[in-house]
Amino acid sequence: MVRQWQTLIYDGRYSNTELNTGHGSRRIPDFVKLGEAYGCLAIRVEREDQVDDAIKLALETNDRPVVIEFVVSADSMVWPMVRQGTSNSDIQYALEHSPEWGEE
């Protein structure tokens, strides 16, 4: 969401949201390796057709915690969101779309 705020509120001025190793990998931290280091079942989902199987496996796993890393585009947006300095009644459920609360 930090990158989302930088895109929407700070005109694309990005700071510390490009986390890469310089060796071609953009997974810092690598949540699968981190989860495995803590004894978790760790799953990486990179395509939409992997979602159901990953969730099914996670629900069937009863002997340890499960970490699922869902890989999405860096430009994906997380909704709903509330902009900084506003009240929760100013929630947006998509870009430039807010619910109507029946208030004037």
Image (cartoon, rainbow, N blue to C red):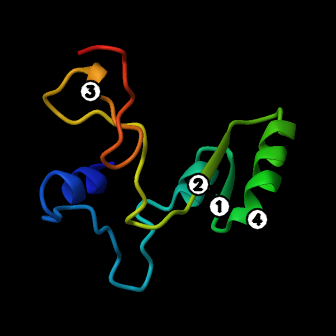
Q: Which mark is residue 69?
A: 2
Q: Where is residue 17 shown, x and y percent of the image?
A: 27, 62
Amino acid under disc 2: Glu
Q: Nearer the viewer, mark 2 or mark 4?
A: 4
Pointer 1 or 2: first along the chain: 1
Q: Where is residue 81 shown, x and y percent of the image?
A: 34, 37
- Could you tell me how far apart the alpha carbons at marks 1 and 3 are, in whole angstroms? 34 Å
- Could you tell me how far apart the alpha carbons at marks 3 and 4 are, in whole angstroms? 34 Å
**In the figure, is residue 38 to the left or right of 59?**
left
* SS label for mark 4: helix
* SS label for mark 1: strand
* Residue occupying the far right of the picture: 60
- Residue at the location (39% across, 85% down)? 23
* Above or below for 58 versus 52: above
Residue underneath mark 3? 90
**In the figure, is residue 69 to the left or right of 42?**
left
* Above or below for 8 versus 66: below
Residue underneath mark 1? 44
Q: Where is residue 66 shown, x and y percent of the image?
A: 69, 42
Residue underneath mark 4? 49
* SS label for mark 3: helix
Q: Are marks 1 and 4 in contact (CB under 8 Å)?
A: no
- Could you tell me how far apart the alpha carbons at marks 2 and 3 are, in whole angstroms? 30 Å
Q: Nearer the viewer, mark 1 or mark 4?
A: 4
Q: Nearer the viewer, mark 1 or mark 3?
A: 3
